[in-house]
Image (cartoon, rainbow, N blue to C red):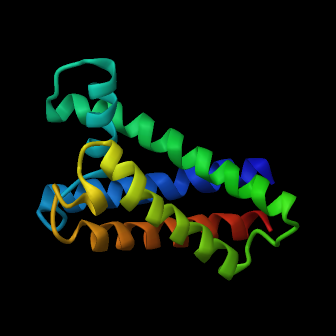
Amino acid sequence: MIFAGFLSGLIAGLSMGLMSHAGYREGFLKSSLFIIDGSFALKVLGLPYDERRAVLFGVPVHLATSVSFGIAYAVLTQVLNVVPTNISSVAVYIFVLWLSMLFIALPIAGHGLVGRRLSAFTWFEQFLLHVIFGLSFLGILYIFE
């Protein structure tokens, strides 16, 4: 089950990240998760910001955190003896991840509470991206069922 969590997190993170970056590039979204994660990594490392560098750092950071969330879900479902493909369990987990993004990750990364420094609608963009993450995540988990 740990491998299923790893792979589900990786593929869901990639799906979410690519949709976020494509939406940002096309002007539909006000931010890219790859750039958010990369700019934070650059800040922590004391490196100068430029968008290309932020994306190069952001992709592995984003995928690593997505994998960690996938593995954490796999462990939680084993510990709590919950069926991993239970739609309610996945929905609650993804909802908690979304709230964590809004109230912990975005403020720590310097984008303000619920990402207000990025856009007034960051909370909604993040909601849509987390729905993509959740659907991708659940789909991969079903393959391992």
Q: Nearer the viewer, residue 137 or 115?
A: 115
Q: Quadrant of residue 110?
A: top left
The residue positioned farthest toward the bottom in the image shown: 88
State the quadrant of the N terminus: bottom right
Residue 73 falls left or right of residue 19: right
Q: Residue furthest left?
A: 27
Question: Is residue 118 shown above or below 36?
Answer: below
Query: Above or below — where is 2 with respect to 97?
Result: above
In x, y percent, where is residue 44? 33, 25
What residue do we see at 36% from left, 73% from top? 128
Residue at left 76%, top 58%? 76
The image quadrant of residue 99 is bottom left
Picture coordinates of residue 6, whole percent (x, y): 66, 47
Residue 13 is left or right of residue 124, and the answer is right
Total residue callouts: 0
Q: Quadrant of the C terminus?
A: bottom right
| Residue 48 found in image quarter | top left
In terms of depth relative to the viewer, which is nearer, 32 or 123? 123
Q: Which residue is located at x 43 percent, y 36 percent?
A: 61
Give whichever of 33, 124 is nearer the camera.
124
Lateral position of residue 105 relative to residue 27, left or right: right
Residue 21 rendering spot, x and y as whole percentages:
26, 53
Where is residue 66 shown, x and y percent of the image? 53, 49
